[in-house]
Image (tube, rainbow, N blue to C red):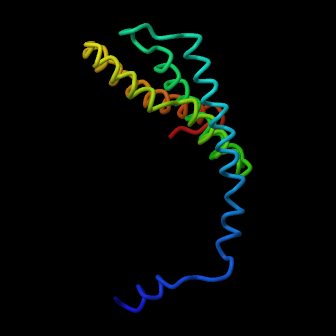
Amino acid sequence: MTAPEAQSLRVRTGSPRQPAVRAQAPVVAVVALGGAIGATARYALTLWWPTPPGGFPWATFWTNVVGCAVIGVFMVIITDVWAAHRLVRPFFGTGVLGGFTTFSTYAVDIQRLADGGHLARGAAYLAATLCAALAAVWLASTAARRVLTGRQR
């Protein structure tokens, strides 16, 4: 063991870590709150627009596409237009939109389609969601940048 490695293993005393933990507590709280809001909205949408067995999961598809478009606009707003409070991005970007969009439900939907013998529909859903979500974030961020800042990138 070299000397720098030995020094890194020393037990640190004092409380330099406590201020860091306290500083992160509001971030964790707003992410949790935002996630609860986003997940509740997503769940409400799936209740409103249920997927029949073997059917294309339109609610999850549009949730992810719309969520990606909103992420694109949101990122332009907080990076190019508005100096947001430090908790806005964790609350809305990570919390609300992270809870609203859903990779886990997307994966479960694909698995259900495949297990139900709907392989082509599952593959189409897999590819369509990926392409539509990427297109949505790119189109929304490009449009927002042009409208809100007058710049093209």
Residue lying farthest to the right in this orientation:
85
Residue occupying image coordinates x 43% and y 88%: 6
Depicted 54 relative to depicted 139: above or below: above
Residue at (45, 27) in percent of width and height: 105
Q: Position of residue 46 (x, y in %)?
A: 55, 16
Vertical placement of residue 49 versus 146, above or below: above
Q: Residue at x 53, y 30 (%)?
A: 101
Up the image or down, 27 lies above or below 81; here it is below
Left/right of residue 60 with respect to residue 124 in the rendered view:
right
Residue 15 position, x and y percent, is 68, 77
Q: How many marks?
A: 0
Expressed as whole percent of the image width and height from the top left, the position of residue 74 reads: 62, 37
Q: Residue at x 69, y 70 (%)?
A: 18
Q: Quadrant of residue 12?
A: bottom right
* Quadrant (top left, top right, bottom left, bottom right) of the N terminus: bottom left
The foreground one among 133 and 114 is: 114
Q: Identify whether 3 is placed above or below 57.
A: below
Q: Is residue 145 left or right of residue 52?
A: right
